[in-house]
Amino acid sequence: SKKRDGKNGAQFYDPQLQDHTRQRAEIEHDIEEGLAQGWFDAFFQPIVQVETGRVVGYEALMRLVHPEHGIMPPAPLIAVAEETGAITRLGGQILEKALANLARLSDASGNHDAYLAVNFSPLQFDPSLPVRLAALTTEYGIAPKRIVIEITEATLLHDNPQIRTILDEFNRYGYRLALDDFGTGYSSLSYLNRFPVDIVKIDQSFIRALADENPELRHKSRMLVEGITAISHKMECTVVAEGIETEEQRRILADFGVDYGQGYFFARPQAVATLIDESRMPQTRSLKVSAR
Ligand code: C2E
Ligand code: MG
Ligand code: MG
Ligand code: MG
């Protein structure tokens, strides 16, 4: 039998490590099987006008719809896919699903204006990405200005010339660029200066703190959100608040002039078939904020 002590033995028997390794192997397996069986889907979360609740767009969010484990959240899948390199294939499948879903939803609802935001990991920024995206928008008859590329500050961190070239190409095609999780990176403001950003998405940690029980934190977060909104508007960017869960948060954001928002208060990410059903029966369910 194997030694339980000594350098290698101790590591091998570390129950936490073994657990982690097994879990990772399971995720790797789920990714490969999900890709082969077509279990990945792009759920859509509505993005609305904060003031009125009117839907202006959707964010595509990856879901693995597993026949046994149910709907799996994306974060662990993406982390592992980035490590193994599967993110390229995974991202390609999600992009195709997202555009096909947008085309179906637009046809069913008659709304051909709503935009679609798609998340990209830095590792998906392959030089062939813009032309592949262009082929898809042409195939599905989607106007390029309806597509928003969502990246986080991590993608811009090293000012990689290859990434800049890809962003410029997106820009030439007419796709828009959103900076996701804004305010959580290293030099958030400098990215507004150096890259062609159209949309700033204020990270949900700031939105959560707007109504925090600690009055000092509450005050400071409000000043930050108001300030980020003013700066973004001066830079001619549209502002989207993420993770709005309460009417109080919605009202504060509306008072600050935040343009758009998304969050459980308005709607959760949903299968597009559900959104299509709702669009056929608009009177059965409406957003909690009525038009003013
Ligand atoms: P994200 O792009 O910042 O997306 C917003 C996340 O907030 C989503 O989590 C969404 O479900 C969640 N959310 C929305 N409203 C609320 C709310 O009111 N309260 C709370 N607590 N959460 C809310 P999700 O779907 O688990 O995705 C997590 C992250 O995974 C995303 O963050 C994005 O970074 C990444 N991701 C998702 N789909 C894709 C994809 O297709 N490709 C890539 N590369 N990354 C993706
Ligand atoms: Mg996003
Ligand atoms: Mg975000
Ligand atoms: Mg995020």
Image: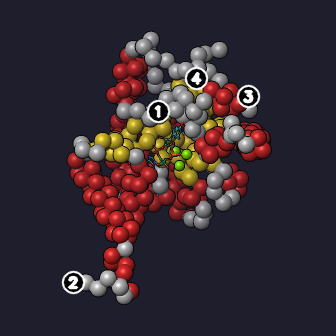
Which structural element holds mark 2? loop
Examine the rendering and report whether any part of residue 58 can be seen.
Answer: yes
Mark 4 = which residue?
53
Circle 4 Cα neighbour tier, 10 Å, few/some/many (<14 / 14–19 / ≥20)? many
Q: Report whether 231 appears left or right of 238.
A: right
Q: Is residue 135 above or below residue 49?
A: below
Mark 1 = which residue?
268
**Amino acid identity at mark 1:** Arg
Q: Nearer the viewer, mark 2 or mark 4?
A: 2
Location of the C terminus by quadrant is top right
Q: Which mark is residue 255?
A: 3
Q: Is residue 85 above or below residue 248?
A: below
**Is label 1 within 8 A of ligand 1 (CB to nearest ligand atom)?**
yes
Which structural element holds mark 4? loop
Mark 2 = which residue?
1
Q: Earlier in the sequence, mark 3 or mark 4?
A: 4
Residue 283 place in picture, x, y as percent: 44, 11
Q: What is the distance, in whole Å, between disc 1 and disc 3 at their CAs?
A: 23 Å
Q: Are marks 1 and 2 in contact (CB under 8 Å)?
A: no
Circle 1 Cα neighbour tier, 10 Å, few/some/many (<14 / 14–19 / ≥20)? some
Q: Quadrant of residue 50?
A: top right
**Amino acid identity at mark 2:** Ser
Q: Earlier in the sequence, mark 1 or mark 2?
A: 2
**Amino acid identity at mark 3:** Asp
